[in-house]
Amino acid sequence: MKKITIAIDGFSSTGKSTIAKQLANTLTYIYVDSGAMYRAVTLYAMQHKFISESYFYVDNLISSLHKINLTFKFNKELGFAEMYLNGINVENEIRTLEVSKFVSKIAEVSEVRKKLVEQQQKMGINKGVVMDGRDIGTVVFPNAELKLFINASAQKRAQRRFDELFKRGDKVTFDEILKNVEYRDHIDSTREDSPLTIAKDAIVIDNSEMTLDEQFEKIYAIALQVINKS
Ligand code: CDP
């Protein structure tokens, strides 16, 4: 079967990565979580004290970008690739609310976007890739055969993210998660470089009232149709 490129965009915590992983595993495609890359750069910036609640030394981050090496390594047990920052597995660290608080500021920086988009395009060069993020259908793979835009109510999204972090044992409140989700949505959609927008040819899916199985069935059927037509 011919391999295609699947681009999945949408607001924060819409479950993009869940559906992207399911699709990639079923189709034996590569899954790339582009958000993990922005999160890893954010972690680097935090570790090097380039960003905090009260400052952001953006020039220092830009001049250090060449020192940031991002790689994905497939973890067989988990069934997906984990994020490595300069050779260190940071998969857990990048998912904290602390990183979520700064990531959208980091993702506004054009130099950061340029570096990551180049790497993402290389990863998708042979097709057979499912990538999720904010600018995948609009900037990274404007020619993707299938573009999905996933949405859900802010309340539902915050609840899902809260459950996820609570299960891991993170000490977070629903209110701070909701605030973070809304804050990131705002910055991501209004930034100058590659704002989150719905690509003209994207299929929009609201999964507020869908179970994971329902969502997968619906989207997998769409994917098969597109693959058969390609
Ligand atoms: O929390 P969630 O899983 O929804 O977000 P993520 O996919 O991990 O992405 C974290 C943040 O990275 C987003 O809020 C954006 O600011 C940024 N991002 C981006 O700008 N472009 C992408 N292609 C992916 C993520």
Image (cartoon, rainbow, N blue to C red):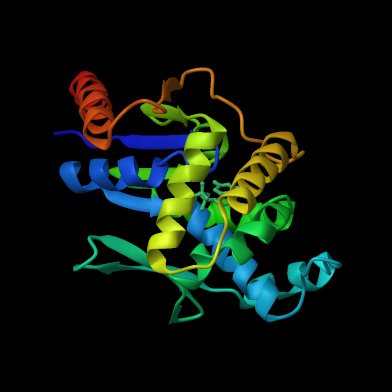
Residue 55 seen in this snapshot: yes
Left or right: 191 in relation to 160: right
Left or right: 57 in relation to 120: right
Residue 99's place in the image compared with 220, above or below, is: below
Residue 68 placement (x, y as % from top left): 59, 74
Left or right: 30 in relation to 177: left
Quadrant the C terminus occupies: top left
- Asked whether 199 or 229 is in front, the reply is 199
Residue 188 placement (x, y as % from top left): 67, 41
Asked which quadrant contains residue 92, the reply is: bottom left
Q: Tell which residue pokes out farthest to the left in this image.
A: 1
Residue 202 placement (x, y as % from top left): 46, 22
Residue pictured at 26% horizontal, 69% vertical: 75
Residue pictured at 49% horizontal, 39% vertical: 157
Residue pictured at 53% horizontal, 67% vertical: 171
Residue 121 placement (x, y as % from top left): 47, 49
Left or right: 102 in relation to 131: right
Residue 78's place in the image compared with 17, above or below, is: below
Asked which quadrant contains residue 198, the reply is: top right
Quadrant the N terminus occupies: top left
Residue pictured at 32% horizontal, 63% vertical: 81
Residue 48's place in the image compared with 206, above or below, is: below
Q: How many marks?
A: 0
Asked which quadrant contains residue 134, the reply is: top right
Residue 141 seen in this snapshot: no
